Image (cartoon, coloured by chain):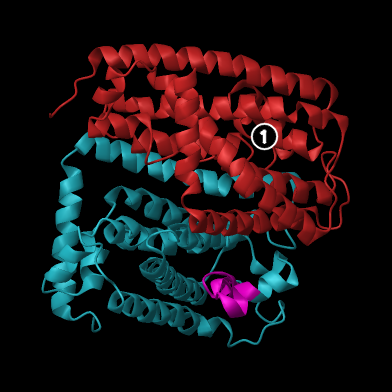
Amino acid sequence: MAAPLPDDLRLYVRLAGARIREQMNYRLSFAVHTVIDAFLIVSDLAPVYLLSRYFGALEGWTFAELALLYGMVGLSWGLVETTLRGFQKFGPFLVDGELDRVLLRPRGVLLQMATAQIEARKVGRILQAGLVLGIAFVFLDLGPASVAWVALGVAGGILFFAGILLLGAASQFWTMGQTAELQNMLTYGGSAALLYPVSIYSTWFRRVLTYGIPLAFVNYFPALAALGRTAEAGWPPWIPALSPFACGAVLALGMLAFRRGLRRYESTGS
Amino acid sequence: MRAYLHFARCSFQRRAAYRLANWTGIAVNFFFFLIHAQVLVAFFGTRTLAAGWRPEDAVLYFAGSEALLMVLAGFPDWENNVGARIRSGQVASDLARPVDLFYRDLAERFGNAFYYLLARTTVLYAGALALYGIAPPLRPELLLLPLSLVLAIAVSGAIWYIAFSVSFWTENATGPVSAVIWVHTVLGGVVVPLDFYPDALRWVCDALPFRAALYTPVALLTGKLSGSALAFGLAHQAVWLALLVAGARVIEARGLRRLVVHGG
């Protein structure tokens, strides 16, 4: 499990391409799913809109600014959910002994699991989150520097969510699939938490989201920088720049835990 | 009837076998409780009353909704449902039994619900209220809660049964089922209590069945339903249950007529 080599990357593209072509076989079903998925995510933003509409701004954050937060987390989580879904559905691989077959092949486990399940229809979600992000940019009249901050946050989010998926998958080596739901807490739950600025949460919860599980680095800090509000929120100006490091640490931890788990793996022996 | 009770008991036992899974589930529900409650309280800001709700009511509502989410099957059972049975061909042996497909499914939902009521709701609700130091809102209306819960469990069971019945016609029901999930999340009051919706959307929610599966029992538990609103809520649940059961029966009868089981 070395760092992905260019050769591995080529293989990833080929395997992913095969998965996507496989799903394209059912053209109508694919089109319907993509459209449904793109619309469905509206329901993530609908509560934000309805609450903003009833109460007005949330601690100084307007709906357009909340939409920026949503676009960032929606884009990074959407990209990870589409491309690394194999780790989200890892339980059955362990419990049914599928993993044996993966281990027999002369390729890295991470690479094979990453391509085990790719849901092309989730592309609809990615496009939709990107669209919301674009509209928020126009509404908030953000310049190129702000766009760079948002891109940094999205990149951090990708590292973060990939790390959480790996940690969640790794934990199942010890619990035989019973902790599958734990990663949902930090992926779906984490995205739900990040629909709003981290500053609205109570002190202990905010501390957990900043120093414990660095969710705040996925969209809150980069968004503060993009909106030019880092100082106003009481943070030093270099905090948003830490985003890739804080999130990268989660991914490193995830890879370490997965490798540990793999070492203690004993087949179910079917 | 004995056969159905047996299915309910088996379903209960299947859930009870995975203790650790229940605890991780509690952690997930609790995380969502913390988010939903804190967000709504933050929106209150300095207000002490909005739409007749106090900030404490927001905490109570989401303590109830997350504690009851699994009881009321806010999400469908992806592994064990009529769609999966059709795809695997298991439906053939189901049909050979003198047990009705729909009622057997419903019996299993009640078995699950009973398990979650004992193992999840109690822990979550007590934990959430203890964290915020809020006393449970004991009022005479709570005597109607069991009735509302039974209606809600049946309504949600019927909704998911109908959604998965799409598999009678197309092999994969994932798309339509996830559409129902999201509609239910928004119109059922999972993320925002319906009291904060604009009037037009409120009417839509009152007309459609989704609030019967979650909002009505949770708002009743929170003490936000009384008098005519409570009477409407319960009547809405009963009427929609009748309609959904009838609908499920019709769909099932039609589906079975065109069902072809492959393989041997």
Bounds of the magenta span? A208-226
Which sits in the foreground, B120 or B245?
Answer: B120
Chain for disc number 1: B
Q: Which chain is cyan?
A: A
Q: Can you say whether A5 is above or below A84 in the image?
A: below
Which sits in the foreground, A62 or B47?
Answer: B47
Identify the main secondary structure in magenta.
helix
Residue B159 appears in the rendering: no
Tell me residue B14's x, y (percent): 44, 43
Residue A256 appears in the rendering: yes
Question: Does residue B235 appear to the left or right of A93 in the view shown?
Answer: right
Q: Residue at x 61, y 35 (%)?
A: B188
Q: Give yes or no for residue A212 being in the magenta stretch.
A: yes
Which sits in the foreground, B240 or A5?
Answer: B240
Q: Can you say whether B77 is above or below A91 in the image?
A: above
Question: Does residue B244 appear to the left or right of A13 in the view shown?
Answer: right
